[in-house]
Structure formats: C-alpha cells, structure tokens
Amino acid sequence: MTRPGRVLVVTGTDTEVGKTVATAALAAALTAAGERVVAYKPVQTGVVDDEDGDMPFVRGATGVPAYDGVRLREPMAPVQAATLEGRPLPALEEHVAAVRRYAAAADTVLVEGAGGLLVELDEHGRTLADLTAALASAGSAASVVVVVRAGLGTLNHTMLTLEALHRRDLTVAGVVVGSLGPVPSAIELANLDHLRTRAGVPLLGVVPAGSGTLDPEAFRSAAPGWLPDGHALVARRDVG
C-alpha cells in the first residue's frame, strides 16, 4: 500500500509575514527535489468574487495544485469575516478530510494557515494548532513550518509561537524568514544568527524581499536556493 503524503503546516508569527510566498517557495523547492506537492488553505479571507488570493498565487508561481477550503470577502480573521458575511465556516473535521484526501495522491501537502497559529478556523474556536493535532491523531505525518519576520520584535514572536507548538507536543520542521532585503540591518543580522543558533529548531532558509513579483520560471528556479536546508525536509519524510 502506498504511504499517504506527509503534511507541512505553514503558520506565521503574525499576518503579513510572508507565509504565502514561503509556502510557494517550499512547494517549488520540494517539487525540484522530485516530490509531488499539493497546497491547501483552509480559510482565505479578504478576497472579492474572482480575486485570486493566496492559493492561486502558489499555483501560478509553482505549477502545483493549490486549493482553498472557503473564501471570504472581509480582510479579517476567519470567524469574524464569516460572521459579517453571514456564512458558516467548515468544521475542522472537513479540513482534516480534505488534507487527507490530497495526501493520498501526493508526497507532501502544504497547509497554509490564516494569520498566526492560534487564529480560530471554525465556530468552535479550533485553530491551526488544533488542525495540526487532529491531522496527527488521524495518522498523518504532520509538522509545522513557522514563517517569521527578520526585523525587530521577531525573536519574541518566534519564541512564543514555538513555545505554543512545543506545549501542544506538535512537531516543528523549522523556521523560514519570510522576507529579507538585499542589505540586512544589524538588527536583522543579529536576529538571523539567533534564529540559526538559539531557536532550537532548524532555520530552513530566508526568502528575499520582492520574491513574489518574480515570473514563475524565475521563481521556480530560485526558490531551492532560498531554502538551503529545505532539502532536508525531503529526507525527513517521517517527521511528525
């Protein structure tokens, strides 16, 4: 029997830290390493009608299949956006079923969260952390990639997120810096050193600022170089 693909849950220390571009970079790097990758976002907010949003970006930049669970108009946390729109949110179990369905035909499913780790995804208050735990309980090899800022404040935000993951006994695959300019400041360099040596989890790589504007061919070619330790994710297929 073919083993179902593992799940990498991509969360951030906050909103607008570069999760979507990091998700696309992971997809491109894993695809370049020969993996079959699918991306999934349980709840996409802030999209109107046929506006693209995050998963269409991932699909366009990398060529991997990428799907939304539900799309909401207001650029808010999912529960609040759904309340304003008068729509029910899918239960967490529906997202678990969707991810496991995609995993049946993929080596890796990338699950991009909304905002940070503890943003609620359904009307029962369950979060991306709960989704990760539910996937692990259902037999999926699930681990978390944390996308972080490079600048001032990131160390506290990162360590708080990692502590929340460790307290829940969730496996952390590593950290990715979501955006870094061509001339890092002294603060950014010090933060990178701390993340590399003292965070207690692998620093998988750093995504250059502006990477999301590259054309797809350039993005796919460059992404593996942004994640020099990302190749280890292929070798660690039993992580989670």
Image (cartoon, rainbow, N blue to C red):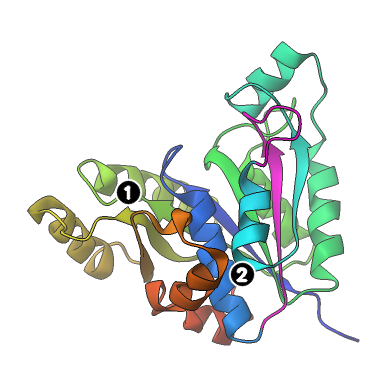
In the displayed structure, 209 sits above or below 29; it is above
The residue indicated by pointer 1 is 149
Q: Is residue 38 magenta?
A: yes
From the top left corner, tell me how far across and down residue 181 is, in percent.
24, 56
State the extent of the magenta-drawn residues as a range: 35-52
Residue type at mark 2: give it: Gly
Q: In this view, does 181 lie to the left or right of 4?
A: left
From the viewer's perspective, is the residue at label 2 or at label 1 nearer? 1
* Mark with earlier residue (2, 1): 1
Determine the secondary structure under disc 2: loop
Label 2 to label 1: alpha-carbon separation: 24 Å
Residue type at mark 1: give it: Arg
Q: Nearer the viewer, residue 163 or 73?
A: 73
From the top left corner, tell me how far across and down residue 112 is, in percent.
61, 51
The residue indicated by pointer 2 is 240
Which quadrant, please, contains the C terminus? bottom right
Q: Residue at x 32, y 48 (%)?
A: 149
Which quadrant, please, contains the N terminus? bottom right
Q: Residues within 10 Å of mark 2 (few under 14, many from 20)?
A: many
Q: Which residue is drawn at 75% across and 35% down?
A: 50
